[in-house]
Image (cartoon, helix red, strand yellow):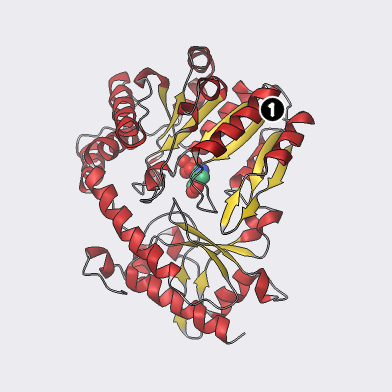
Amino acid sequence: MTTTGHRFDALTAEYMRAAGSWKWSTPGESHGRGLIGAFVAEMDYPVADAVAGAVRRSADASLFGYLPDAWVGDMAAACSSFWGDRFSWAPDPAWVRPVPDVLTAFTATVRHFTRPGSPIVLPTPAYMPFLTVPAMVDRELVTVPMARDGDRFVLDLEGIDRAFAAGAGLLVLTNPHNPTGRVLDDAELAAVTEVVERHGVRVFADEIHAPLTFDGHRHRPYAASSEAAAAHTVTATSASKAWNTPGLKCGQVVLSNAADAEHWTATGYLAEHGTATPGVLATTAAYRDSRDWLDEVLAYLDGNRALLAGADLPGLRVTVPEGTYLAWLDGRGLDLDEPPSAFLAREAGVVLTDGAACGDAGRGGMRLNLAMSRPVLAEALDRLRTALFDT
Ligand SMILES: Cc1ncc(COP(=O)(O)O)c(C=O)c1O
């Protein structure tokens, strides 16, 4: 169904372009039509009332000063309670610390929780900044292409094992996974732990997409999967993907053992410092007061997934996500002499993330952001289909 009667259906391309988000700001047109933005990971949906209310109250009462401990505590308690209810793991709120974003959590983890100079292991295709940020903190990057198990992407544990044997010190474990949409199962998490423990190394668990796990799949926090995992992991998350607030600059580092919590207390100040006060208040409102909104969004996204699953996209191999609102489209079968994303931006007017930006393993692929209104997604899929038929 391309209309649902849901209020999100009214979020037309014209409305989104006028609002001016990054996703809708690519200039140009295709065959006389405006471009449809389907790249950067933000949703077109208006935020939850409680989140908007928290930002409004911040402005009304000029709550733009430094962060009081009490508000950090409220946010940490709200995050812990949400994780406890949804993922059966309620971390000690004292071990949930504010950071502006997950990338800051990542650089702080590299600096303070890994062997100095040790390379970083990244399964690819990957969230794009993980390919470039390690060099910015003077670390070598070792990419390990993911393997395919039918339609699912899976970790290449032997490749990860080899990277650790060669001296790497940290695995970036993104779960649910951007850009492949995988939600790892318990056996896969246990297999990661076995390799990591054997080498005495660390895991940075990026679980920013955890609340966006679809029915039929279950997000298990990596640090909660075993005592060993808790001992070698720094987890990062945020309400910013699931509640659509990345510009509010509030994420969370979750420590899972006393030694790491103590070490964070000694080293984490700079990372915490950039957290935005209104973002903390909005994040509390998201985790504590906006669960119905999240469920509504998940149901709507699920309908968008179904539309993608049923779409006729000749020559593309489509991976429907288990979690996240990002879908992987493999265009290598098209055999074009340009990146499929460039072809489709020009011919279909749909702006996707080019797979090569996710690492060499992503070359020829594309990432499609499904978090738009159903009618706009239907138009995007129709444009893709027409362009593909014409190749
Ligand atoms: C897997 C993953 N990690 C991190 C981020 C960035 O998060 P932040 O804006 O909190 O740095 C994103 C954003 O899309 C993401 O998908």
Does residue 135 appear in this view? no
Q: Which residue is drawn at 58% across and 72% down?
A: 316
Query: With 347 as the anchor, is 25 left or right in this view?
Result: left
Q: What element carries label 1?
A: loop
Question: What residue is disc 1 on?
Answer: 169
Three-letter residue code for mark 1? Gly
The answer to whether 32 is drawn above or below residue 40 in the figure is: below
Q: In which quarter of the image is residue 341?
A: bottom right
Q: In which quarter of the image is the C terminus?
A: bottom right
Quarter of the picture holding the N terminus:
bottom left
Number of marks in the rendered image: 1
Horizontally, is 176 left or right of 280 in the view? right
Which of the two residues, 10 or 219, is positioned nearer the viewer here? Answer: 219
Q: Is residue 159 above or below residue 194?
A: below
Q: Is residue 76 above or below residue 338?
A: above
Residue 126 position, x and y percent, is: 60, 49
Q: In this view, does 195 lie above or below 243?
A: above
Q: Looking at this view, is 287 or 35 the one in front?
A: 287
Is any part of residue 134 visible from this angle?
yes
**Other-residue count near label 1 (Cα within 10 Å), few / some / many at <14 / 14–19 / ≥20:** many
Q: From this viewpoint, which residue is outermost toward the right? A: 166
Does residue 241 appear to the left or right of 281 in the view shown?
Answer: right
Tell me where residue 381 appears, x and y as whole percent.
45, 75
Query: Hey, which quadrant is residue 339 in on the image?
Result: bottom right
Location of residue 240 in the rendering, given as x and y in whole percent from the top left corner = 39, 43
Image coordinates of residue 353 in percent, x first then y, are 56, 61
Find out if the beta carbon at label 1 lies less than 8 Å from the nearest ligand 1 atom. no
Could you tell me which residue is drawn at 32 percent across and 30 percent down?
84
State the residue at coordinates (64%, 23%).
Answer: 197
